[in-house]
Each structure stands twice: as C-alpha cells, then as structure tokens.
Image (tube, helix red, strand yellow):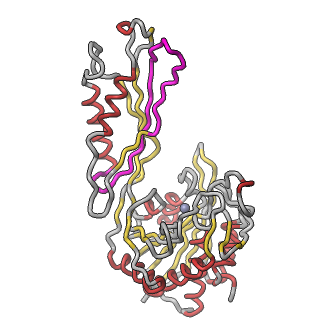
C-alpha cells in the first residue's frame, strides 16, 4: 500500500508534528506531501490579526467539472498537559495493544489521515474523477479561531471557490465508530454582568449599597424561567453561570462591585440577536425589583458586556447529503448512526454559510486528555466510510 492510502502511516506522520496552536509544527507540510502526489494543488495562506498570533492554513484542491466536495478540519492540537503522565511521548505515535497514542490522534489528525487515505484510494480507482475535492485545513481551531477557517473560507471564496457540500472530520462518536453524525450545532454566547454598588461598613448598611443582592436578582432572572424546552432537533438551551467574583477578603466591609459571567448554549429557538434581546429584557426587569434590596434605589446599577463573538446555531437541511453519509456509515459498520446536534461548537459554524455541512469522525472519548489515542482498526474503518461517502457523493 502506498503511504497516502494507509491511514495509520498518515496519522503517524501527522502526530510526529508538534502543532500546538498556533504552531504549524510541520503538520501542514506533512499533509501537503500526502496530497500533492494525488493531483492536488496546495496553497498555504497565513492570516494575521492584531493581538493574535499569525496562523498558517492549507487549502488544497483537485479540480474537475462536476460537484465540489470539501473536507474540513484542523491540524492544530491542544497542549499535552503533564507530559510525564503520558504512557508514551505525546508526539511519538507509539502503537500499543492495537491503539496509536498521541496528541491529536482523534482530535483531529486521525480524521485528516483517514480522509487523505480515502481520497488516495478513490483516486487510484477513479483517475478521471469528474468532480472536485478540496481540503480546507486550519491551524487555528483549538485557539482563538480568528486566523483560521473563517478567514480561509473568505479567502477561498474571493478566489472564486464554491462548494456543493462539506464534511468535517471532528470526532463525533461518543462510544464507538458509527454512533453519531452531527448535522448541526448549538450556538454559544457569553456575557459578563458588572453590578456597581457603594462600598461601606457592614454595621452601617444605610450608608452603603451592596452590589450582591442586585446581582442575585439579576442572575435569578437569567436562570428562571428556562429559556426553552428544546426543539425537534435540539436539546433545551442552557445558561450556566461560570463565575461570580467579588474579591472581598474582609468580614466587615460591604463590597463596592460584583461581576458574574455566564455562557449560553442555545438551540434554533433563538438567533444570537433574539437571545441577546431576551437577556437584556430579563436583566432590565429584574433590576427594577426591590425584592432583596428594600429601601435601596432602583434600578440595580449594572452593565452587561458581551464577550467574544457569538457562535451561531445552525441545522443542516440537505437531506440527500445527510442520507449519503448515513448510508456510508451504515454500509461499513452495520450501524445506523444517530443524527445529533449535541456537544460543543466546531468550525462547521463557519462553513454552513457557504454550503451544507455534516460532521463525522473518530470516537472522541480521549480527546484533549492525557494518553489521547485511537484504535488502529477504527482508522481503517473510518477510511472505508469516507471512501464510500466520496464514491456515493460523486455517483
Ligand atoms: Zn477538533
């Protein structure tokens, strides 16, 4: 077997590259070396933005006249954590008991290794492929995601690129290969509330104004009632208060300021605009209440600061694409995968603005952990699923 058709060799080469975000680490060069012999033209644009590190990305296309299928993913990996806790060095790609160890083994160098192998096998059998296949690979998925897929998509579109469908190779299976396809993702929105009071002596509360009762009322209004009960395709939206900070070490001081931060994972009941409006509305109403602050001036003196950019919720409606992937998984594994929108965000949130997108990859159990590892057998199975998917897509 030539190396680019062997996912195990492909993955070993990728794992050997220490591509912790934002370092390229040799990983894009390794992928370029797999794709160039298959007839791909490869470009590696570097994107910059003030305040963030420059990031190198890769776009490879093998052109034809038919439909255009994009495979998307990232070669960057999260840090290894406590390296001494690993059973094998995290960039050694050691194989033990039928599993390959290494940072990125499942998230998601493994997915890339399998897709490259699948394309290699398919092109070997179909030299005159009419369609186009492209790889849209970023080095900035695990980091701030500013100089990554979003800019790479804009850059490619500006060159005249367009796509009919995309598959993202993130690890989507919770337990075993074939469990789950992702056909959408929840949105994510974060905010920080700052409540301003008046610092003072606890024995003279009439001279002070604690920010804490006001903060409690504001947070209660966000937590209750529930945002929604879920939809046909999504679980219920959820707001988590992630931190409440006062920083007051004294027992006899009423603090002057309190902050709290929350994150919402939301479903398609909302857009980021309607959800932001709902949050503002709830806070404004709660700020006017005196329940916990008798005798104090209403409303609570607060500000709300939205953090980062929201990630938008999306759901893929291309049933033909979903069925093509579902039947490819089923024909190789014998399992009909569940269609899910659960879990965190992925770069599919950027791709969905350009073409329908589905996600399927390895088993995610060990992602981001010490001893991240993948079953060698899964690499072969996923390669077969991808090859089947490519064949059915172009059929
Ligand atoms: Zn990932």
Q: Is residue 286 left or right of residue 109?
A: left
Picture quadrant where residue 127 is located: bottom right
Relative to the observer, which residue lies in front, 359 or 145? Answer: 359
On the rendered structure, is 217 left or right of 68?
Answer: left
Q: Residue furthest front?
A: 97
Residue 95 at x, y percent in the picture: 71, 73
Residue at image position (51%, 20%) is 248
Q: Position of residue 2 (x, y in %)?
A: 69, 87
On-image quarter of the N terminus = bottom right
Q: Is residue 239 magenta?
A: no
Instruction: Identify whether 356 is placed above or below 117.
Output: above
Residue drawn at x 40%, y 25% is 195
On whether residue 267 falls in the magenta region, the answer is yes
Q: Is residue 10 above or below residue 234?
A: below
Q: Residue at x 69, y 69 (%)?
A: 29
Relative height, residue 351 to residue 394 (above, below): above
Quarter of the image with the C terminus in it: bottom left
> Where is residue 290 shown, x and y percent of the image?
25, 21
Q: 50 left or right of 234?
A: right
Q: Quarter for ligand 1?
A: bottom right
Name the residue rendered at 30%, 63% in the picture: 233
Q: From this viewpoint, is residue 393 visible?
A: no
Please name whichever residue, 93 or 188, is drawn nearer the observer in this view of the structure: 93
Q: Is residue 378 at least partly visible in the picture?
A: yes
Q: Is residue 252 above or below residue 313?
A: above
Q: Which residues are magenta?
A: 242-271
């Amino acid at each position: 077997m030539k190396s680019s058709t062997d996912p195990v060799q492909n993955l070993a080469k990728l794992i050997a590259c220490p591509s912790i975000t934002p370092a390229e680490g040799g990983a894009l060069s390794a992928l370029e070396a797999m794709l160039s012999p298959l007839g791909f033209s490869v470009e590696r644009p570097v994107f910059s933005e003030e305040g963030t590190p420059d990031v190198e990305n890769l776009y490879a296309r093998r052109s034809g006249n038919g439909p255009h299928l994009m495979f998307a993913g990232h070669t960057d990996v999260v840090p290894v954590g406590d390296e001494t806790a690993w059973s094998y060095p995290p960039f050694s790609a050691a194989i033990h008991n039928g599993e390959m160890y290494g940072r990125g083994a499942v998230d998601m160098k493994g997915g890339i290794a399998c897709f490259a192998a699948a394309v290699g096998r398919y092109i070997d059998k179909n030299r005159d492929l009419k369609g186009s296949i492209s790889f849209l690979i970023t080095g900035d998925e695990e980091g701030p995601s500013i100089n990554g897929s979003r800019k790479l998509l804009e850059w490619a579109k500006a060159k005249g690129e367009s796509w009919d469908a995309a598959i993202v190779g993130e690890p989507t299976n919770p337990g075993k290969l074939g469990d789950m396809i992702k056909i959408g993702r929840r949105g994510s929105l974060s905010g920080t509330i700052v409540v301003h009071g008046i610092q003072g002596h606890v024995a003279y509360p009439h001279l002070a104004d604690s920010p804490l009762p006001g903060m409690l009322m504001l947070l209660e209004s966000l937590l209750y009632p529930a945002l929604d009960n879920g939809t046909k395709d999504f679980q219920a939206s959820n707001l988590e208060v992630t931190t409440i900070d006062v920083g007051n070490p004294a027992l006899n001081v009423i603090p002057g300021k309190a902050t709290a931060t929350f994150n919402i994972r939301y479903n398609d009941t909302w857009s980021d605009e309607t959800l932001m409006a709902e949050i503002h509305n709830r806070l404004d109403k709660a700020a006017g209440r005196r329940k916990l602050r008798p005798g104090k001036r209403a409303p609570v003196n607060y500000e709300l600061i939205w953090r980062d950019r929201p990630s938008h919720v999306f759901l893929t409606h291309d049933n033909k694409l979903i069925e093509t992937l579902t039947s490819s998984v089923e024909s190789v594994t014998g399992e009909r995968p569940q269609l899910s929108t659960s879990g965190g965000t992925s770069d599919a949130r950027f791709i969905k603005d350009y073409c329908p997108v589905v996600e399927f990859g390895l088993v995610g159990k060990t992602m981001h952990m010490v001893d991240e590892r993948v079953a060698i057998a899964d690499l072969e199975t996923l390669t077969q699923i991808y090859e089947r998917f490519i064949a059915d897509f172009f059929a």
